[in-house]
Amino acid sequence: MTAMTNHFEINPVTGLLEPVNYQASPHQDERPPSMLIDMVVVHGISLPPGEFGSPAIPAFFCGKLDMNLHPSFAGIATLRVSAHLLIRRTGEIIQFVPFDKRAWHAGESSFQGKTRCNDFSIGIELEGTDDLPYEETQYHQLGKVINLLRRTYPQITEDRIVGHVDIAPLRKTDPGPAFDWGYLKGILA
């Protein structure tokens, strides 16, 4: 586990957030040429559903989820999904995809008339569920990361920090009604 830190940097060569644990996901590829990164998508995930702290989320994003470990894994173990970052309930951050690469987090999606949101967004997963409050430390870590991303990618404006529900409203509900957008905006101010 990576120790909590008050200072992060994005390595301009590797595209990685430092210092955090990096577990390379095979579920990534190049962004389209000349594509500007201009959005952050906040997600919520728990594996098994409603349980926290297991190694299942990193295994899922790295294509190593054992479908025999829980009945709910059978239907998802073969999916090719990733995110740039996971922020656990403890505040620990794990990176799976460099920011300059395309993570496979949004699926079929659109925002303000643009489709294929994976092409131009950074996906950040919070360990949680739609209906349980997220932890204060998750908001603070998320706020630090988003502020750094906004300095690195100035096209990420306040109105382009969205939930998965905002880009795929007929398919997704996360980060859910328990996510406090007002609290996050206060941290970002």
Image (tube, grey):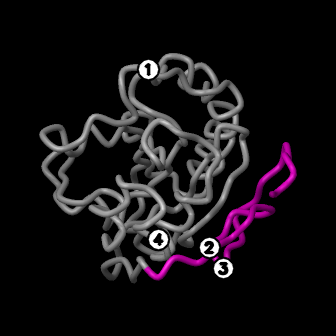
Looking at marks 4 and 1 on the same chain, the residue that comes earlier in the sequence is marked by 4
Instruction: Find the distance from the CA under tag 2 to the CA under tag 1.
Output: 31 Å
Residue 40 as seen in the image, left or right of residue 118: right
Q: Which residue is mark 4?
A: 66
Q: Which residue is mark 2?
A: 15
Mark 4 lies on a secondary structure that is loop
**Residues marked 3 and 2 touching at CB (< 8 Å):** yes
How many neighbours does mark 3 have within 10 angstroms: few (below 14), some (14-19), or many (20 or more)? Answer: few
Task: Specify the amino acid type for callout 4.
Answer: Asp
The residue shown at (54%, 42%) is: 127
Looking at marks 3 and 4 on the same chain, the residue that comes earlier in the sequence is marked by 3
Q: Which residue is mark 3?
A: 14
The residue shown at (62%, 31%) is: 139
Task: Specify the amino acid type for callout 3.
Answer: Thr
The residue shown at (18%, 51%) is: 110
Task: Specify the amino acid type for callout 1.
Answer: Ala
Image height of 24 relative to 103, above or below: below
Q: Nearer the viewer, residue 71 or 110?
A: 71
Q: Which residue is mark 1?
A: 178
